[in-house]
Image: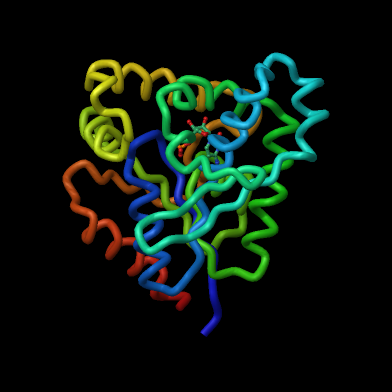
Amino acid sequence: TDRINIAIDGPAGAGKSTIARRVAERLSYVYVDTGAMYRAATWYFGQRGIEPEDEEKLLQMLPDLVIELIPEPDGQRVVINGQDATDEIRSIKVNAKVSRYAQVEGLRSRLVALQRQMALRKGVVMDGRDIGTTVLPDAEVKVFMTASVEERARRRFNEMKEQDQITMEQLIQDMARRDRLDQERKISPLRQAEDAVLLDTTNLNLEEVVNVIISMCRSFV
Ligand code: C5P
């Protein structure tokens, strides 16, 4: 049977990455975590002291940035120019800055080009903010995944590496700020594609959400 592409968008902590990975497993598809790519870029430029405002320098150095997403049984490793930064890209520091780097047009167009290339042969489950609207507007299945802000904070808390350094209250504020920046930015803001299915996962467990998406794919695969 023919393979399809699946786009999963939504705000921070909606459970996109866990769900997308499971859906990919079930279909033997490839999972692409585009958030990890923006996080990797943020870490890379942060290390080199280049702020998002310094667009000229940033774009000059962009060709040197090499991001590898290496699938592992229990997630993925993120290697940036040969250096493992799997944990670093989930740090509080990167959380605080990623949405500002994600506003830089030249960075976005470079990452979008890479993402499209990864999906050329189909059989990809890609999650992010602009997949259904910009990266893969022709994806056969599009989901816009949400959950209540409390539930999203709880989920994000559980996947963080530095729980002891952050309170739930801070996490909610960080998420709300990031969502606002992502929704209000000029280039490909976070929003539901017209042909995307809205899926509120607040009261659904992981298996239920995965099953909903798999059943959406049934007419294709
Ligand atoms: O998905 P995750 O929370 O790891 O994404 C981190 C940040 O990367 C988002 O808050 C957003 O600013 C940016 N991002 C984006 N476009 C995507 C994926 C992520 O702008 N497709």
- Left or right: where 144 falls relative to 208: right
Give the quadrant of the C terminus. bottom left
Image quadrant assignment for residue 202: top left
**Residue at (24%, 24%) from the top-left corner?**
164
- Left or right: where 187 falls relative to 129: right
Observer-nearest residue: 99 or 185?
Answer: 99
- Left or right: where 81 falls relative to 29: right
Image quadrant assignment for residue 106: top right
**Residue at (22%, 61%) from the top-left corner?**
207
**Residue at (48%, 35%) from the top-left corner?**
89
Relative to 180, residue 130 above or below: below
Image quadrant assignment for residue 212: bottom left
Give x and y (percent) for residue 126.
51, 54
Give x and y (percent) for residue 209.
27, 56
Instruction: Using the rendered image of the protein, determine whether residue 35 is visible from the camera's viewpoint.
Output: no
Relative to 177, residue 75 above or below: below
Residue most extreme to the bottom: 1
Give x and y (percent) for residue 125.
49, 60
